[in-house]
């Protein structure tokens, strides 16, 4: 497979690949992500293959707008709504109850991790494509890429397209917080601390 790098503004080309069941890499506010349409099970499975990702690891969903949480969630806890109002778009991923129609390749559990990235190129793509299953655009276990060239060095020949939006300004994966219990539980440390989360509840 030939891997092409094009400017991130050319989202129509990326959208056409996604519609045909393909996967594309693109910049977010944290690191570069590798994504497929959220309801395309076989495309999501190809993310696992491209990354050598263990199949038991769930893949988060990125959406372009708060109302799109309803597309992938069976219900939205009040805690998650509050976090989303304050911290999204931004480097926070909320684990919430999963809609049963989401494909099994996203998560084998009854939850889904959802985020709105604070990046204009990513938001443009998400508003065109809808909800996307997205994880960092790297070989599993290796450094998360912050430039299109770093994606290319790891995934050349494994994916068809990289949208080049320059260096990402975050560089650290998002904070992952479980919003399904009585109190928030941090599953992965990131830019937003537990103290910041608790302060808005």
Image (spheres, grey):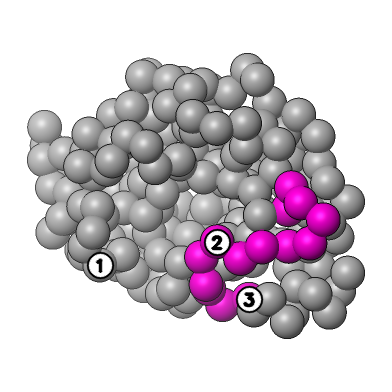
Q: Is-magenta flag for residue 190?
A: yes
In this figure, which residue is indicated by the disc labeled 1? 143
Q: Of callouts 3 and 1, which one flags the residue occurring earlier in the amino acid sequence?
A: 1
Q: Mark 2 packing: few (<14 Cα in 10 Å), some, or many (20+)?
A: few
Q: Nearer the viewer, mark 2 or mark 3?
A: 2
Q: Is residue 200 above or below residue 27?
A: below
Question: Which quarter of the figure has residue 182?
Answer: bottom right
* Residue at point 48%, 23% (across, down): 104
Question: Which quarter of the figure has residue 3?
Answer: top left
110 relative position to 138: left or right: right
Q: Is-magenta flag for residue 73?
A: no
Q: Which residues are magenta?
A: 179-192
Outermost residue, front direction?
Answer: 182
37 relative position to 145: left or right: right
Q: Mark 1 packing: few (<14 Cα in 10 Å), some, or many (20+)?
A: few
In this figure, which residue is indicated by the disc labeled 3? 192
* Residue at point 31%, 64% (across, down): 144
Q: Of callouts 2 and 3, which one flags the residue occurring earlier in the amino acid sequence?
A: 2
Q: Quadrant of the N terminus?
A: top left
* Residue at point 27%, 43% (across, down): 53
Q: Secondary structure at mark 2?
A: strand
* Residue at point 50%, 33% (across, down): 107
Q: Quadrant of the C terminus?
A: bottom right
């Amino acid at each position: 497979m030939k891997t092409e790098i094009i400017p991130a503004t050319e989202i129509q080309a990326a959208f056409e690949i996604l519609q045909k069941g393909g996967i594309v890499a693109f910049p977010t506010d944290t690191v570069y992500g590798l994504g497929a349409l959220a309801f395309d099970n076989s495309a999501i499975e190809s993310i696992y293959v491209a990354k050598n990702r263990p199949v038991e690891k769930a893949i988060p969903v990125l959406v372009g707008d708060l109302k799109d949480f309803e597309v992938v969630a069976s219900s939205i806890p009040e805690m998650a709504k509050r976090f989303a109002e304050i911290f999204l778009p931004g480097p926070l991923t909320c684990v919430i109850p999963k809609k049963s129609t989401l494909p099994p390749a996203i998560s084998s559990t009854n939850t889904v991790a959802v985020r709105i990235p604070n990046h204009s190129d990513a938001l443009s793509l998400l508003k065109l494509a809808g909800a996307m299953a997205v994880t960092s655009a790297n070989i599993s276990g290796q450094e998360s890429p912050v430039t299109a060239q770093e994606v290319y060095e790891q995934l050349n020949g494994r994916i068809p397209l990289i949208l080049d939006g320059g260096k990402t300004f975050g560089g650290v994966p998002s904070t992952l917080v479980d919003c399904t219990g009585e109190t928030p539980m941090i599953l992965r440390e990131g830019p937003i601390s537990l103290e910041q989360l608790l302060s808005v509840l």
